[in-house]
Amino acid sequence: MTARTIFTAGALAALVAGGAAAQEVAVITPYLAQPGTQFYVDGFTAAAENFGWTVNVIDTAGDVGAVISRIEDVTIQGVDAIVINVDPAQIGAGLATAADAGIPVVGMDAGSDPLVAANVTSNGYAMAAETAVYVADRIGGAGNVVMFTFDPFPPVQARGVIADAIFGNFPDIEVLDRITPDVSDGGIADSRAQMEAVLAANPEPGSIAAVWAAWDQPALGALQAIEAAGRGGEGIVITGIDANPQARDAIAQGGNFEASVAQDFVGIGSVTAETVKRLLDGEELRQKVIYVPTELITAANVGAD
C-alpha cells in the first residue's frame, strides 16, 4: 500500500491567509494501476487545489479488503470527506465506520450504496450498448464472440450485463467464452494469455468473429494474442471501453481493434470534487448517481481533438 499527500497551493494560501486548517479529503482505491483511475485522481486533485483542500491519495494495490482498514485509518485521523473507487458492497464495514463518524463518502466510478452520498460515473449501460451493437452490426449479427468482463466491480459488471442482453437478442451470435482476467497488473498480460488459449482451441479461420471487452486492457491483450498468432487478417473485430491512449493508437492503425468509448476520466474526477464540495457546504444531494458524458471512438474520429 502506498499513499501520497498533496498539499495544494490553495491549501497553503488558505493557511497563510486565515490560519485555519485546510479541509482534508482522502481518496482510496485498489486500482491506481489502471490508467482510468490515474486520470480520475488527476482530475480530482486539480479541482481540489482550487478548493484549497489537502488530498491524501491511498492506493491499496489491488487489495480490496485493505480499503476497509484505510477508511478506518482516515476516519480516526478526522478527514472531512472520503472518496472511493471500489465496489461499495465489498467495503461495508469501512463505510459504516465513516457514517458513524459523520464523514461523507462519495464514489468516483464506484457504485451505489445507501452509505455512499453519491456516485459520479459514466453511463456503463449506454457504453456497453454502443460497443455491443457495434460488434453485432460489424459481424452481420452472426458469429462467435469472446467476452472479457469483470463482475467484482459494479461499473464494469453492468457493462457485461448489457452486452450479454444485446448478443442474446441475435440468434446467430454465440458467446464462445466469457473471461474474467487477472487485473493485478492492469489486465493486459493475463488477457493475452487467456486469448491465446481461446485461439488455440479455435484454430479455424472464421471461428472467432469478435472480441468484446468491458474495458481497454483486455481488448489490447486480445489484440496482442491475435497478432502474435498470425490471425490479424481474419477480420476479428475488437472493441473496448475507455479509449485510453494505447487503445486510440490501436484504433488509428486500422487493424482489428476498431472501437472504444471515451470516458471523460478527468471530468469524472473534477465532478467528484465538485460533489464533495457541495456536501461539505451542507447541501443535501437529490441525485445519487451523476453521469458524465461519453463518446464512441472509431477510425472516423480517433484523430479528432
Image: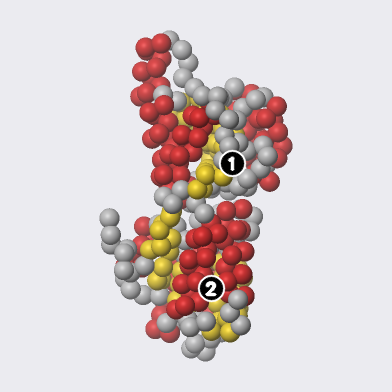
Please state which amino acid type lies under the numbered disc 1.
Lys
Q: Position of residue 130 (x, y in %)?
A: 48, 66
Q: Position of residue 253 (x, y in %)?
A: 31, 70
In the image, what residue occupies the spot 55% across and 77% down?
A: 145
- Residue at the front extreme of this rendering: 286
In the image, what residue occupies the spot 41% across and 11% down?
A: 18
- Residue at the bottom extreme of this rendering: 204
Distance of label 2 from label 1 (alpha carbons): 38 Å
Which residue is nearer to you in this view: 156 or 121? 121
Q: Position of residue 40 (x, y in %)?
A: 45, 44
Q: Quadrant of residue 235?
A: bottom left
The answer to whether one can see residue 232 in this image is yes
Which residue is labeled 2 in the image? Answer: 195
Q: Secondary structure at mark 1?
A: loop
Which residue is nearer to you in this view: 161 or 178? 161
In the image, what residue occupies the spot 53% across and 73% down?
A: 195
Which residue is labeled 1 in the image? Answer: 288
Callout 1: 10 Å neighbours few (<14), some, many (20+)? some
The answer to whether one can see residue 182 in this image is no
207 on left or right of 151? left
Determine contact: label 2, label 1, CB under 8 Å: no
Q: Which mark is residue 261?
A: none
Q: Quadrant of residue 174?
A: bottom right
Query: Eyeballing the image, is 194 above or below 273?
Result: below
Q: Secondary structure at mark 2?
A: helix
In the image, what residue occupies the spot 27% across and 55% down?
A: 305
Q: Quadrant of residue 75?
A: top right
155 on left or right of 97? left
Please state which amino acid type lies under the numbered disc 2.
Met
Which residue is nearer to you in this view: 101 or 227? 101
